């Protein structure tokens, strides 16, 4: 097709029939349930209200549901709203190879486009699976340098996955999907400088919206430079991309998305290994604590090491804060553990002073060591988030998480929507009803 082998490989993959992949499909359904739960739970966050206000102000052709809105909106706007509010709590899934959040960029794009074209639930889920896999592979292709330079892979690599999911649902050819990738080379955007503000969840929304927009433009005849991702002056070369062609290994036969990590703490995923480790050392008398040492991979120091968070949003990116919360007995899985008031609470602020965060590049990015000194006695624990977690155990933990957010009755009804038999419009309508009434009316 072109001299862009990475983009061409992704385009051929996204245009091909999807055979087998039973485990990957099951993991995708778990992520879809998790996405619905965190999206509903985030519906009243300030950033969600801002995005819905924008959608109402712009109006447009009614094509898809935007969570919490009484009207249908254009597919691009639905993707923008739903992508943003589903990442508002920072409680969605993460992929450590991708260095980002696959579902919040891709699922909103797939759901909006599926509603627009009237696709089946199976087609929507297959497109979403192709999209999240492509976003992970793109994240690996871009590499750590891209992320460390300040680019947010949820938004940049995520846009590629969103575009391929949307393009697949539009029935684009491999050549046209290569055009989508090329166009997204100039459209993809998102910076880590927004972490701790409304700008971080907005990065997920713009990824979803950019993907829908690029796919629609190509379907209408837009002719971009296909080398926009990896060619001279493309996204990779200009944005510190490594161009790691090993990212294509096993594409179409093995599924990197199966390695996705789901969140069981309502904060940045970089904090979770330390929280799982310290859990094995608690409870203790917090008055007896004289040191909490966290050893993490160096890359997390620029992501979630805000030493003195002043807001609930900043608290989600602070080792010192979450260690103090855990030691004081606060449940870090609860949304109300991340408030402005707790970020400033005297007992929390005092305990933060005992937290020391250091790095060790020999540690896996998914691992952490915590050393706790209480009444002169030191104890230590280690945890790696990539330790094997059976699918049944993962499903049970996600069920419990969703029930904690929404209640058991709502989750029981919601579970019926994440089968391949449910039409995307049914999902959107049910989420819309829930956000207006607090009930999932499936009638």
Image (cartoon, rainbow, N blue to C red):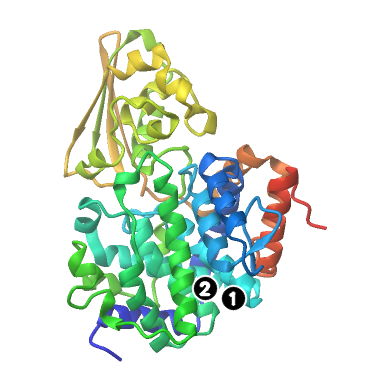
Farthest front residue? 57
Observer able to see residue 10: yes
Q: Position of residue 243 (x, y in %)?
A: 20, 70
Which residue is at 23% across, 73% downward?
Answer: 234
Q: In terms of depth relative to the viewer, which is nearer, 387 or 19? A: 19
Q: Is residue 295 left or right of residue 126?
A: left
Q: Which quarter of the picture shows residue 309?
A: top left
Q: In terms of depth relative to the viewer, which is nearer, 131 or 409? A: 131
Q: Is residue 317 left or right of residue 25?
A: left
Q: Which quarter of the picture shows residue 218?
A: bottom left
Which residue is at 39% across, 62% downward?
Answer: 158
Which residue is at 32% across, 54% downward?
Answer: 152
Observer able to see residue 242: no
The quadrant in which the N terminus is found is bottom left
Q: Position of residue 41 (x, y in %)?
A: 59, 43
Question: Is 379 located above or below residue 90 in the figure?
Answer: above
The residue that disc 2 covers is: 127
């Amino acid at each position: 097709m072109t001299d862009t082998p990475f983009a061409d490989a992704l385009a051929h993959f996204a245009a091909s029939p999807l055979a087998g992949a039973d485990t990957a499909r099951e993991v995708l359904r778990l992520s879809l349930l998790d996405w619905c739960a965190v999206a509903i739970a985030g519906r009243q966050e300030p950033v969600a209200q801002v995005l819905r206000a924008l959608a109402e102000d712009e109006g447009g052709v009614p094509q898809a549901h935007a969570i919490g809105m009484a009207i249908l909106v254009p597919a691009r706007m639905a993707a923008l709203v739903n992508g943003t509010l589903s990442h508002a709590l920072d409680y969605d899934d993460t992929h450590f190879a991708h260095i980002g959040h696959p579902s919040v960029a891709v699922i909103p794009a797939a759901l909006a486009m599926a509603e627009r074209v009237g696709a089946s639930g199976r087609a929507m889920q297959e497109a979403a699976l192709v999209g999240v896999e492509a976003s992970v592979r793109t994240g690996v292709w871009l590499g750590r340098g891209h992320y460390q330079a300040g680019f947010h892979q949820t938004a940049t690599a995520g846009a590629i996955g969103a575009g391929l999911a949307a393009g697949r649902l539009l029935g684009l050819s491999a050549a046209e999907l290569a055009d989508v990738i090329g166009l997204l080379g100039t459209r993809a955007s998102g910076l880590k400088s927004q972490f701790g503000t409304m700008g971080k969840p907005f990065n997920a929304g713009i990824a979803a919206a950019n993907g829908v927009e690029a796919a629609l433009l190509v379907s209408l005849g837009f002719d971009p430079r296909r080398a926009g991702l990896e060619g001279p002056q493309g996204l990779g070369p200009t944005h510190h991309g490594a161009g790691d062609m090993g990212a294509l290994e096993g594409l179409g036969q093995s599924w990197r998305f199966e390695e996705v990590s789901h969140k069981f703490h309502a904060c940045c995923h970089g904090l979770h290994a330390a929280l799982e480790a310290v859990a094995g050392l608690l409870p203790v008398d917090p008055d007896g604590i004289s040191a909490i040492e966290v050893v993490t991979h160096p890359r997390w120091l620029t992501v979630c090491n805000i030493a003195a968070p002043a807001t609930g949003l900043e608290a989600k990116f602070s080792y010192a804060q979450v260690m103090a919360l855990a030691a004081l007995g606060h449940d870090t899985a609860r949304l109300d553990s991340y408030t402005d008031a707790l970020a400033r609470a005297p007992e929390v602020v005092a305990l933060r002073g005992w937290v020391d965060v250091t790095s060790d590049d020999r540690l896996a990015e998914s691992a952490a060591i915590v050393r706790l000194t209480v009444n002169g006695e030191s104890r230590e624990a280690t945890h790696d988030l990539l330790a094997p977690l059976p699918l049944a155990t993962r499903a049970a933990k996600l069920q419990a998480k969703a029930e904690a957010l929404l209640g058991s009755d709502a989750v029981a009804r919601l579970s019926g929507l994440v089968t391949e038999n449910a039409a995307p419009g049914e999902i959107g309508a049910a989420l819309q009803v829930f956000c207006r009434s607090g009930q999932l009316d499936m009638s």
